[in-house]
Image (cartoon, rainbow, N blue to C red):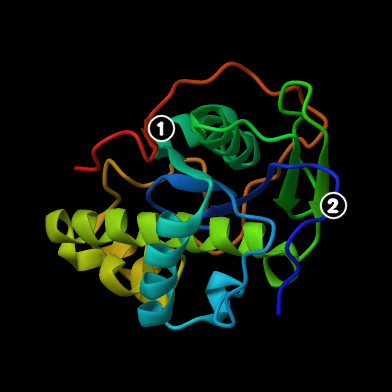
Amino acid sequence: MLRSYHQKDIAFEAGCDEAGRGCLAGPVFAAAVILPPKFKNKLLNDSKQLKASDRDKLRLVVEKEAIAYAVASVDNVEIDRINILKASFRAMHLALEQLKQQPGYILVDGNRFVQYGNVPHACIIKGDGIYASIAAASILAKTYRDEYMHKLHEEYPHFGWLENKGYPTLQHRDAIRLHGDTPYHRKSFRLLPVQPELDFGAPVAEYTVVKVVSPEEPQG
């Protein structure tokens, strides 16, 4: 069973995670979730370890039981402009900004994060397999992004996005060689699955809001 809270004395602790960082196409999505302190679900785990049907079930549970949640994305054009690391941080910040209840503490999956306002945070390596709030954020980021890539697949069916979701599979790379890229491909990413070198010490720049989804807004 995943742990509930990292800081027991803080009322509202948000978990953050992203999806789509290693893709050749499409946006990077991020989610922020605040769960009740006593939230438990035996099925909840890292989204990558779950079947798609289980992720869909858990998404409904999270959206129903969360104190607050939000999902945001930064598109491929912005990714190319600022790099994928900064775009991932920006998507997380956008999600946090949209929470109807601002957190007193933030848990982030991974080992790097850019400070969000004055809110303290902890980076947890493989945190989506340790803390429920991060796992819940992983579920939302993954399922929302998968839905988006399914829609893009209808527009560009040759690239197999229904299956690969934009990741650099052999099928996807072969399709790029055969058909060329699309307006949704990240131009700064190489065709082979080698990611561009990132400047981890560079300051995070200003960004453009691409899309934000929150409980208060209709989701079209």
Q: Residues within 10 Å of mark 2 (few under 14, many from 20)?
A: few
The quadrant in which residue 59 appears is: bottom left
Compared with 44, 202 (above or below) is above
Identify the residue under disc 1. Answer: 77
Q: Quadrant of the N terminus?
A: bottom right
Please name the amino acid that badge 1 sits on: Val
**Residue placed at 42% from the left, 76% from the top?**
170
From the viewer's perspective, tell me whether residue 153 is left or right of residue 215: left
Asked whether disc 1 touches disc 2, contact meaning CB atoms under 8 Å apart, the reply is: no
Image point 71% across, 41% down: which residue? 198
Which quarter of the rendered picture does the C terminus lie within? top left
Identify the residue shown where x is 22% and y is 54%.
Answer: 152
Picture coordinates of residue 165, whole percent (x, y): 37, 64
Query: In front here: 166 or 92?
Result: 92
Rendered residue at 44%/83% (across/down):
51
Amino acid under disc 2:
Lys
| Alpha-carbon span between mark 1 and mark 2 | 40 Å
Disc marking residue 8: 2
Q: Position of residue 147 (x, y in %)?
A: 29, 59
